[in-house]
Structures are given as structure tokens and as C-alpha cells.
Amino acid sequence: MRLLIMGPQGVGKGTQAALLAEHFNIPTISTGDIFRYNIKNKTELGLEAMSYTDKGELVPDSLTNKIVKDRLAKEDCANGWILDGYPRNAAQVEALDEMLAELGTPLDHVVALDADREVLLERMKKRAAEQGRADDTPEAIAKRLETYEKETAPLLDTYKSRGLLVAVNGVGEIAEISKTIIAALS
């Protein structure tokens, strides 16, 4: 099973991706987690990424595409994977299409989670307090949500036109949302 999990920040992509990964026994590939790991460990990649994330900006496509391509080629991805946080724009969709064609691994589904902006803001405020994430300032959150609406949300139409989109309400009990997604993928 090769899946994308998409939706605005704070909608629960990471939570649902972890549950789906366990259910399907495939790895979750979170570009955000990869960048946070490198930032925390002050790697060259981390320092480069931090110059963007500290301002609430997204890491450039060239850097993100390189990381995703490298990760999808790893042995543990042979039986499938879940991409969380990628693609974020039309150029990344093209890059992903090329990667998957090279690897001979077509995309199976795109899970799109959604929630009202007020719910998202509340969730991210809570996450910032609990996890102490430096990238969850009110200004950075607002900027990321605006970027999502402008650049990423339109990609859902692309995947819908390809017959790959599974739209799910991201509000409710975590286990129920997960059951809904799994049922839709079966």
C-alpha cells in the first residue's frame, strides 16, 4: 500500500499515519519529522532547513524532493509506505510522479483529512504547549495554514481527478477516524 496523507497542519495527519502504518505494516515517511530530527541534531541539512522553518516558511522543493527520493528508495519501503507532509505543491506532485515512475511503484490512494480552521488553531496551540515546538508560534501557524490553502489544497483536485482521493473528516475520536480511513481503503 502506497499512500499520501494530506490535510492542513494540525488535522491529525501524523496520528493517523502512525495508525495506518501499524495496520498495513509499512513505514511512515514524514518530511516534517525528518527535518525536525536534523534540526535538533544540528546537521547540515538541519541548519539549512532551520533557516526557513524559524521564519514559518516551508523548506524549498529541491531539498525536500531529494530527501523524499532517497527515503522511498530504502529497502523498508519495498512493500509500501505512507508519505506525510509531501507533496505540498504542484511542482512536488510532478517530482513525486517522476520518482514513482522511476521506482515502478504507483500511488494507491491519497487520504485527505479536513477540519475547520478554529479546530486546527486550537490543536496546534495545544501541541506547541505540550511538545514545545518552536515552529508552532501563532504567526508561523497562520502562515502555514495560508500556504496550505493556497498551494496544497488545490492538489486534492489533481488526485481526485486521478481517482485516488479518499476524503475523511479529521474531527472526532481518533480510532473512529482511523476505522473510516481503513474501510475506505479496503
Image (cartoon, rainbow, N blue to C red):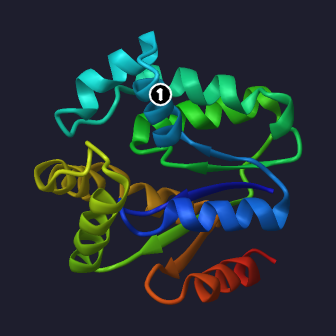
Viewer-nearest residue: 55 or 151? 55
**In the image, residue 39 above or below residue 181:** above
In the picture provided, is 90 more to the left or to the right than 109?
left
Name which quarter of the figure residue 145 lies in: bottom left
Count of numbered marks: 1
In the picture provided, is 85 more to the left or to the right than 117?
right
Tell me where residue 163 appears, x and y as whole percent: 64, 66
Q: Amino acid at mark 1?
A: Thr
Tell me where residue 67 appears, x and y as whole percent: 56, 24
Which residue is outermost to the top? 44
User: Which residue is at a point 68% across and 56% down the rendered structure image?
Assistant: 3
The quadrant in which the C terminus is found is: bottom right
Tell me where residue 63 appears, x and y as whole percent: 45, 20
Name which quarter of the figure residue 99 lies in: top right
Q: Secondary structure at mark 1?
A: helix
Residue tagged 1: 64
Viewer-nearest residue: 41 or 44? 41
In the picture provided, is 16 more to the left or to the right than 127?
right
Tell me where residue 173 appears, x and y as whole percent: 53, 88
How many residues crowd around disc 1 within 10 Å: few (fewer than 14), some, or many (20 or more)? Answer: many
User: Which residue is at a point 86% across and 30% down the rendered structure image?
Assistant: 75
